[in-house]
Image (cartoon, rainbow, N blue to C red):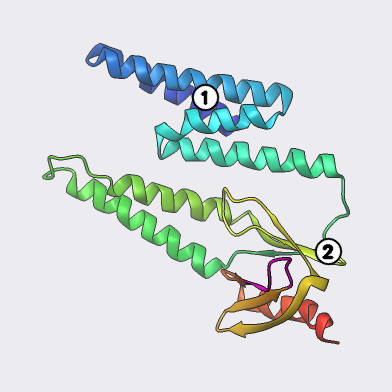
Amino acid sequence: MKTAYAILILNFIFSIAFFWEHWLIGAILTFIWLISAIGLIGFHRTGKKAFAYLSYCGFAPFFPIGLLAIIGIRRKLEQEEEFNLSGPEPISKLYFSRRFLRIWLILGLCLIAAQIITQFWIKFPNPVGAVGLVFVIVSLTLKKSVLIEIYEDHFTYKPGVLSSKKRINFDDIQNFRQVKKQLRLVLKGDKGDQKIMLELMEPSDVEKFKKWLSRIET
């Protein structure tokens, strides 16, 4: 939450700076900033989802730095939900592939470098640096994020930074198979079989997770 508040202050300074030359843009940005401030403070004090979603709307226009604030608020919201559920601790945790995150980080840094190098002769707005910053933010965020949490009778899967956790019971898994570095699961459902793909895992974690899944075939 400290990161979100720091970004809130930076966005306020950024919004006020527009008043000197473009007062209308400055007014619009200040109004959007006010939405993010109400949402962030309201969520911090009450923990209600409505305020969290309101802050998302306020931070999103300040892309890409606003993405950092949204990620921080999202993590805090997940922590609140997990605390309220007060369920059992996971038996094991699996993380995102370090190789995948390293590629994203290098790609992001290359795009930022390209922005810095080309800004001297490209006159029109260049979004390359902003895209690169997003790659860096996502790679550094996912480095500490848990991809899969394994419990006694189920596991949870969180495929992205802002995506919600998906719970899958082991009893619902009909079969699975490995496709290169991915695991393809076939699940029983009310509307027929469903297929999901578990990817972005460390090779060693793939083998570890296969041992857990093998119980459904015994």
Distance between the alpha carbons at the discs numbered 1 and 2? 36 Å
Q: How many marks?
A: 2
User: Measuring 32% from the left and 57% from the top, which residue is drawn there?
Assistant: 110
Verify whether residue 192 appears in magenta.
yes
**Quadrant where the C terminus lies?**
bottom right
Say what amino acid the circle numbered 2 marks: Tyr
Could you tell me if the residues under marks 1 and 2 are in contact, i.e. CB atoms within 8 Å? no
Q: On the rendered structure, is 128 left or right of 141?
A: left
Please give the residue where the numbered disc 1 appears in the rendered image.
Answer: 36
Please tell me whether residue 152 is drawn above or below residue 23 in the rendered image: below
The mark that comes first in sequence, 1 or 2, is: 1
Q: Residue furthest front?
A: 191
Q: Which residues are magenta?
A: 188-195
Q: Position of residue 71 (x, y in %)?
A: 56, 42
Relative horizontal placement of residue 163, taking residue 11 as reference (left or right): right
Compared to 37, does 187 lie above or below? below
Q: Position of residue 42 (x, y in %)?
A: 65, 21
User: Which numbered marker is on residue 151?
Assistant: 2
Can you tell which mark lies on residue 132? none
Q: Position of residue 56 (x, y in %)?
A: 53, 33
The quadrant of the image that shows the N terminus is: top right
Say which element carries label 1. Answer: helix
Secondary structure beneath label 2: loop
Q: Nearer the viewer, residue 160 or 89?
A: 160
Q: Which of the two residues, 189 or 177, is positioned nearer the viewer here?
A: 189
Q: Amino acid at mark 1?
A: Ser
User: Callout 2: 10 Å neighbours few (<14), some, many (20+)?
Assistant: some
- Name the residue located 41 percent from the left edge and 32 percent from the top edge: 62
Looking at the image, is 133 positioned above or below residue 70?
below
